[in-house]
Amino acid sequence: MDLKIIGEMKPEYKCDCSRERVEKALISIGKRDLTEIYEEGKSEEIKCHFCNKSYEFSNQEIGELLNQSR
Ligand SMILES: [Zn+2]
């Protein structure tokens, strides 16, 4: 028998977060704060509270979110 173990790490549960969700969360912090981040030329890293996955938003992407929230 030549069995291969695929993936030793068992996911404890599957988090259903997605970039889309994080975008919505980012928009929900408010346009004013978002504009501030954007105008300071910053990027933003958002971490999921459940699975600790981090999503990075570049300054340009934050600008795009601002346009979307208009
Ligand atoms: Zn998550």
Image (cartoon, rainbow, N blue to C red):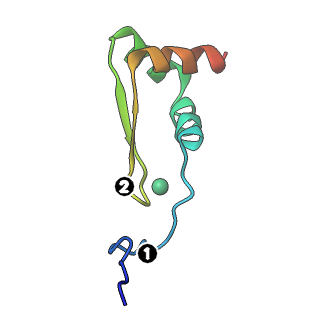
Which quadrant is the C terminus positioned in? Answer: top right
Q: How many labels, in total?
A: 2
What numbered label is drawn on residue 12?
1
Q: Residue at the location (57% across, 57% down)?
A: 16
Image location of residue 13, percent across then percent down:
49, 72
Q: Is residue 45 left or right of residue 67?
A: left
* Separation of marks 2 and 1 at Cα, in angstroms: 13 Å
Compare residues 47 and 19 and report the one nearer the observer: 19
On the picture, is 70 further left or further right than 23? right
Q: Vertical placement of 35 versus 13: above or below?
A: above
Q: Of the residues shown, which amino acid type is indicated by label 2? A: Asn
Q: Name the residue: 58% across, 43% down.
A: 21
Disc number placed over residue 70 in the picture, else none:
none
- x, y (%) of residue 24? 59, 36
Q: Taking 55 as reference, is 32 above or below it?
A: above
Q: Is the residue indicated by label 1 positioned so its CB lies within 8 Å of ligand 1?
A: no
Q: Which mark is residue 52?
A: 2
Identify the residue shown where x is 42% and y is 71%.
Answer: 11
Q: Quadrant of the N terminus?
A: bottom left
Residue situated in front as seen by the camera: 5 or 13: 5
Residue type pointed to by label 1 = Glu
Q: Quadrant of residue 8?
A: bottom left
